[in-house]
Amino acid sequence: MIEIENLVKNFGDVLAVNGVNLSVPKGEFFAILGPNAAGKTTTIKIVVGLMKPTSGTVRVAGFDVQTHPLEARRRLAYVPDFPFLYDKLTPWEFLRFTGQLFRMTESHIQTAGRELVSRFNLESYLSKPIEALSHGTRQRVAIVSALLHNPEVFVLDEPMVGLDPHHARIVKDILRERANEGMTVFVSTHQLSVAEEMADRIGIMHQGKLVAVGTREQLHRQSGVSGALEKVFLSLTAEEQILSRNSPI
């Protein structure tokens, strides 16, 4: 459902994404980890069509995001770490607007919207302007609006930012449920606990490269480190730093 081939992105002299290759199948929960400036968000923005690559290709549900952007976007949803919402709208107006963008019928919007609103405990906020809501509540509205059209691919960048433990648990449960039903979930996070608990496979990105990909067990074997995922992550990124220092300029 997500195919990334030889992906490169330069910002002037800065190489943000360096030859990334990755395939994420239908129904997989894939988490990508990495330190700051590793290239995670840049990769995600290219995947969802918000940024053009310097070279390489990305396909979503079989459609090239550069040559067939509408077909690709029709099948995916994206929630960034700080989502943009229309502040003057109420959450329900925003949900209806989002559903109409995806050409959902009014009855479908009502049915899917009410179910998700209830699941995310948003009933008491539906008639309030979005600008009056807390960051965590806005994040819940953004996730509900993204799930409304039942996307085939759901891409999230730091989805737990601003969420209290109760609603973070709800998000985890719904993402796991949807993945089990066939939705492909692609999550970037700094929270190793989210990846360790939720992901079928984990990718570790560092200095623009995807330095490791696999299940938790495969990453343990690759790193030669036992114990928590944190130890594996630190080992693999430290090895990459040493290699980059020893490389000829």
Image (cartoon, rainbow, N blue to C red):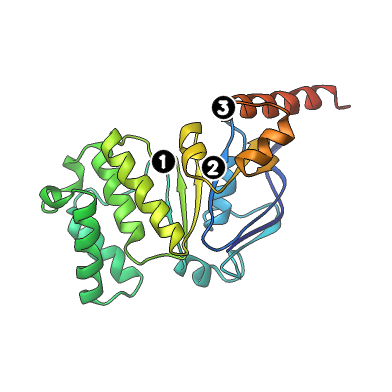
Amino acid on which disc 2 is placed? Thr
Where does the C terminus fall, quadrant-wise?
A: top right
Amino acid on which disc 1 is placed? Asp
User: How crowded is the residue under tag 2: few (<14 C-alpha within 10 Å), some, or many (20+)?
Assistant: many
Residue on which disc 1 sits: 81
Give me the C-alpha separation between circle 3 and circle 2: 25 Å
- Left or right position of 117 against 84: left
Residue on which disc 2 sits: 41
Q: Secondary structure at mark 2?
A: helix
Marks 3 and 2 in Cβ contact (< 8 Å): no
Give me the C-alpha separation between circle 1 and circle 3: 25 Å
Name the residue rendered at 64%, 28% in the picture. 232
Residue on which disc 3 sits: 228
- Left or right position of 92 against 246: left
Q: Nearer the viewer, mark 3 or mark 2?
A: 3
Name the residue rendered at 14%, 53% in the picture. 126
Q: Earlier in the sequence, mark 3 or mark 2?
A: 2
Q: Nearer the viewer, residue 208 or 186?
A: 186
Q: Secondary structure at mark 1?
A: loop
Name the residue rendered at 34%, 69% in the picture. 101
Q: Earlier in the sequence, mark 2 or mark 1?
A: 2
Marks 1 and 3 in Cβ contact (< 8 Å): no
User: How crowded is the residue under tag 1: few (<14 C-alpha within 10 Å), some, or many (20+)?
Assistant: some
Marks 2 and 1 in Cβ contact (< 8 Å): yes
Measured from the top left, where is residue 203 in percent x and y?
A: 62, 42
Measured from the top left, where is residue 150 in percent x and y?
A: 37, 66
Q: In the figure, residue 206 lies in which quadrant? A: top right
Give me the C-alpha separation between circle 2 and circle 1: 9 Å
Measured from the top left, where is residue 109 in percent x and y?
A: 24, 69
Q: Earlier in the sequence, mark 1 or mark 3?
A: 1
Q: Can you say whether 248 is above or below 151 in the image?
A: above
